[in-house]
Image (spheres, rainbow, N blue to C red):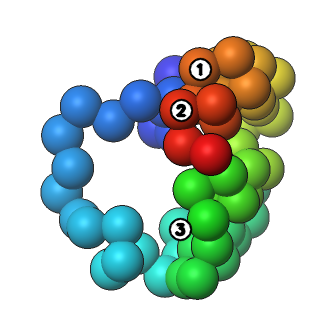
Amino acid sequence: MSRIVPQATTVTCPRADADAVVTEWGVAELRGCTLSQRAERMIAIAAPEFREDLSRHWHDHGRAAHE
């Protein structure tokens, strides 16, 4: 089960407070990034078996809503 999910239901930390996210697959530097850049960077550090689904979901649902 991936901890990086396509949608958040409860926000525990404001977007501006998250500088970086670290997983066993890498580090996503988020400060100063657009929502699209943030999504792409988070997908890049998700477990490899979940990246394709996360990317597809972002492309189909998230990107258009945030650009």
- The residue that label 2 is drawn on is 65
Measuring from the top left, give residue 14's x and y in whole percent: 26, 67
- The residue that label 3 is drawn on is 21
For badge 2, the amino acid type reads Ala
Callout 2: few (<14), some (14-19), or many (20+) C-alpha neighbours within 10 Å?
A: few
Numbered disc in front, either 1 or 3: 1
Secondary element at image label 2: helix
Q: Earlier in the sequence, mark 2 or mark 3?
A: 3
For badge 1, the amino acid type reads His
For badge 3, the amino acid type reads Val
> Can residue 14 be seen in the rendering of this structure?
yes
Measuring from the top left, give residue 45's x and y in whole percent: 71, 53
Whole-angstrom CA distance, mark 1 to mark 3, is 22 Å
Q: Is there a contact, CB below 8 Å, between mark 1 and mark 2?
A: yes
Viewer-nearest residue: 27 or 8: 8
Residue drawn at x 71%, y 60% is 37
Callout 3: few (<14), some (14-19), or many (20+) C-alpha neighbours within 10 Å?
A: few
Q: Earlier in the sequence, mark 1 or mark 3?
A: 3
Residue drawn at x 33%, y 35% is 8
> Can residue 42 be seen in the rendering of this structure?
no
* Quarter of the view holding residue 27: bottom right
Measuring from the top left, give residue 43's x and y in whole percent: 70, 44
Numbered disc in front, either 2 or 3: 2
Whole-angstrom CA distance, mark 1 to mark 2, is 7 Å
- The residue that label 1 is drawn on is 61
Tell me: 54 left or right of 51: left
Q: Quadrant of the C terminus?
A: top right
